[in-house]
Amino acid sequence: MSTLTTESPAAQLDPRIIRERREQRLRYILPLAAITFALGVWEFLVWYNDVPHYLIPAPSLIAKTLVTDGASLMQSAMFTVKLTLMALALAIVGGVVLGMLFALSRPIEMSLFPFAVILQVTPVVAIAPLILIYVSNTFAALLICAWIVAFFPILSNTAIGLRSADHNLRDMFRLYQATPWQRLRYLLIPTALPYFMAALKIAGGLALIGAVVAEFVAGTAGQNTGLASRILESSFRNEIPRMFAALFLVSVLGVSIFLSTAWLSRAVLGHWHESEIKREG
Amino acid sequence: MTPIPAPEGDTPLIDMRNVDKRFGNGTVAVRDMSLTIRQGEFVSFLGPSGCGKSTALKMISGLLSVSAGTITVNGHRPGESTTGSDIGFVFQEATLMPWATVFENVNLPLKLQGVSKAEARTRVEEALSMVGLANFAKSYPRELSGGMKMRVSIARAMVTKPKLLLMDEPFAALDEMSRTKLNDEVLSLWKSLGLTVIFVTHSVFESVYLSSRVTVMAARPGRVVHDIALSGRYPRNAAYRMSPEYAESCRSVSTALEGTMDHVDLNH
């Protein structure tokens, strides 16, 4: 070993770190490359076989439509975003509050759980028409539909999570005469957090599905409507590229929701919970 | 067999009189247990599984109620508001909160008792250096070995400066090396802080090495069958393990323990 080596950035020379960095880059590059490749094949096949755009439009045409119809599509996207996020927020509030009640009291759980299950297992498409009849405000009706779909996983996971505290830790809290509030704050909530995060990842996707399905059933037309209405409308008018463009926006929305909930979960649990800890290999 | 000893020290810290514990399903976990433990003693509860040694410990801590009889700890009933901080409890597993750092775990009893942050900090740091983990305050439990986790658990029990330390088979899951080391650490804590320790174990060697007195219990129903004072002098160390005194104590405690097995149904 030469003593001449000055404060060289040894970390950069470490082969393990180099490998890790390469892996990190690949994590982004590979999915992007795969998608680009698939789009290329799609574009090529459409062009090569001369497929008419009212059957399958080429990706380039969809992109063009996204620009030309941008204003109306973005307005609809904003509507769907608003609907989805509000449904998710209400699902979180309702699910957490009810989940806490369930965890506090078995009788409450036993009486209310059947209703939650019935709401969950009945397909939202089947209930939506009724809700649309009973609730005069369309936005409120759509919100209820999306909420029903997103709410159940949060409720059930919160209730299970709050009950999952280690029994020795419970004893510890009893030994030091913790107040109910301290027990909730320092023991039950941290224990329930991983369960809640898992539910949030599911509920985020479900809220979007609920919002889109409900709007399909409502079949609303006009200015203040969401992406589902754009898809329906395009289908009636046979504007297939526009339909794909709206569909693309729905997917982008779903992916963003998934990525943000996954990011949030890692940010909250990353330092301690097995599900989010990166193993050194 | 040595009969019931006249323990050293004068103040009786724990007084158990005719204590029964029956569980809802009809199991008699402890029957007619009477025991006086004086301040400064190191007592081991030794016995086969199901002899009620952990149950007795939990009744003394107030985590379980008695079905009959009385227990007083320092003149109070267990579970009374005054006893909480007087007792440190170390569970069979380290029982740490995985989401909290070592510091936060040790700080928990103080936080629950509303000790001011500044004072809590010094006391947690003290407790951590006592178990040799001063440099691990910011680590998370998953980053520690089994023995280190147990040390955190001991630091947490000691942070309220209790007079009485209850340990429920604390080192049963550890390897021999860590176990030996932790045994010595517990002994030095006991000596330097003037603690009273009740140590539940199913190891004859561990009980003889540590205690000034071994309470041998039998199962079905759980009860005390022997109460043996050990003559071995402190401080105890590797030399003590080699001494004839140690061998003699192990023999007599083993014999007492074997006596408890007489009625055990071997088909179980």
Image (spheres, coloured by chain):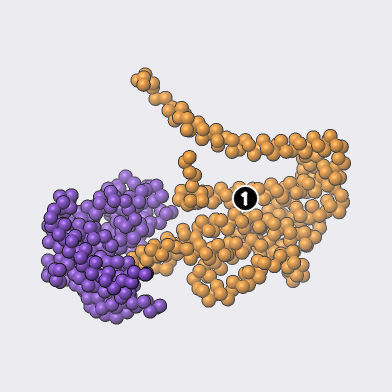
Pick out the residue farthest to the bottom.
Answer: B68
Label 1 belongs to which residue?
Answer: A258
Q: Who's purple, chain-wise?
A: B
Estimate how packed mark 1 is, as few (under 14), some (14 to 19) or many (20 or more) residues with alpha carbons within 10 Å.
some
Residue drawn at 18 percent across, 49 percent down: B238
Q: How many marks?
A: 1
Assign a secondary structure to mark 1. Answer: helix
Whole-percent x and y of residue A234? Answer: 83, 51
Q: Return the residue nearer the eye: A257 or A78.
A: A257
Q: Who's orange, chain-wise?
A: A
Left or right of A194 on screen, residue A79: right
Whole-percent x and y of residue A161? Answer: 50, 62
Whole-percent x and y of residue B189? Answer: 21, 55
Quadrant in which the N terminus of chain A is drawn: top left
Q: Is residue B245 visible?
A: yes
Figure quadrant of residue A5: top left
Figure quadrant of residue B220: bottom left
- B177 vs B76: above or below: above
Left or right of B126 on screen, residue A215: right
Q: Is residue B57 visible?
A: no
Q: Return the residue nearer the eye: A186 or B92.
A: B92
Residue drawn at 81 percent across, 58 percent down: A221
Left or right of A93 on screen, residue B17: left
Residue drawn at 37 percent across, 69 percent down: B268
Q: Amino acid at mark 1?
A: Phe
Disc 1 chain ID: A
Figure quadrant of residue A166: bottom left
- B228 vs B127: above or below: below
Whole-percent x and y of residue A108? Answer: 54, 75
Residue drawn at 87 percent across, 49 percent down: A238
